[in-house]
Amino acid sequence: MNKLRSFVKNEMETLKNKRDYRRFRDRYKHTKRVLEWARRIHAVEGGDFTVIEAAVWFHDIGWEDGVPHALVSARIAEEYLTNNYFCTEEICNEETRNKIINAVKMHSYKELPGDDMDIETRVLIDADNLDELGATLVIMDSITDYINHPEESTYRNVYKRIYKYYSKLSGKDNEFKTNEGLRLYKDRMEFLKSFLDNLEFELGLDMETEKMKIEKDFKSAIN
Ligand SMILES: [Fe+2]
Ligand SMILES: [Fe+2]
């Protein structure tokens, strides 16, 4: 798996030039965090961890304008897994290879029901979905708010941004395909709710007025 990890790292280095790159949202670091989520879910749900790990490494490797990145990544995974130079027994037998490619291909289809998916695909989808939720979301939104509006960034504006994303991410239970993934998601959302309650208290926000304002801004941002 070491060879695979270095291959992914190199590919992702070249992607930095093609995409809008922000250090704190580095895709290689995202991939490493997804692997940790996958480990936690796999410990409870099972599945073939060799397939899960390889699928995690490949899942965001591809990027091309106008083509879903899951399909580009699956194509790169397929090329890699059929190339004799890279092949090792653990990942290149036909059944394992097909499962890895399929998981990578399916990882963006979070709205599809999980019943017909392999356990490995379901673990990848949930692990990917869990990254940048919870405490990480708070940091991500704080940095992003400052980068987007350095002159206007205030605690209240960061609060508004986190509240908006919290609302957007609520009620996504059916995007989670394993019980453990769903449990971890609910935990993150509870943490965020408690964080927002504490922040409202500390900033002395009058919530009736604030929430009405935020919902109005939110709707106009979406429309
Ligand atoms: Fe992705
Ligand atoms: Fe991802």
Image: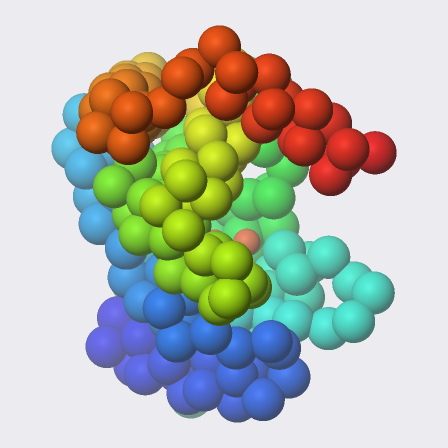
Residue at image location 58% in from the left, 27% down from the top: 214
In this view, 219 is above or below 84: above
Q: Position of residue 112 (x, y in %)?
A: 65, 25
Q: Residue at x 55, y 82 (%)?
A: 15
Q: Please count the marks in the image.
A: 0
Q: Is residue 217 left or right of residue 136?
A: right
Q: In the rendered image, which quarter is residue 133 located in?
A: top left
Image coloring type: rainbow
Q: What residue sits 66% from the left and 31% below the top?
A: 218
Quadrant of the rendering where the N terminus is positioned? bottom left
Q: Position of residue 42 (x, y in %)?
A: 23, 35
Spot the residue most to the top.
208
Q: Position of residue 205 (x, y in %)?
A: 36, 23
Q: Is residue 120 visible?
A: no
Position of 34 relative to 167 (above/below): below
Q: Tell me if residue 118 comes above or below residue 88 in the rendering.
A: above
Residue 186 visible in image: yes
Where's the C terminus, which quadrant? Answer: top right
Name the quarter showing ligand 1. Answer: bottom right
- Figure quadrant of residue 65: bottom right
77 and 184: which one is in front? 184
Q: Is residue 199 left or right of residue 64?
A: left
User: In the shown orientation, is residue 198 left or right of residue 186?
Assistant: left
**Residue in the picture at 51% in, 58% down:** 152
| Viewer-proximal residue among 185 and 125 | 185
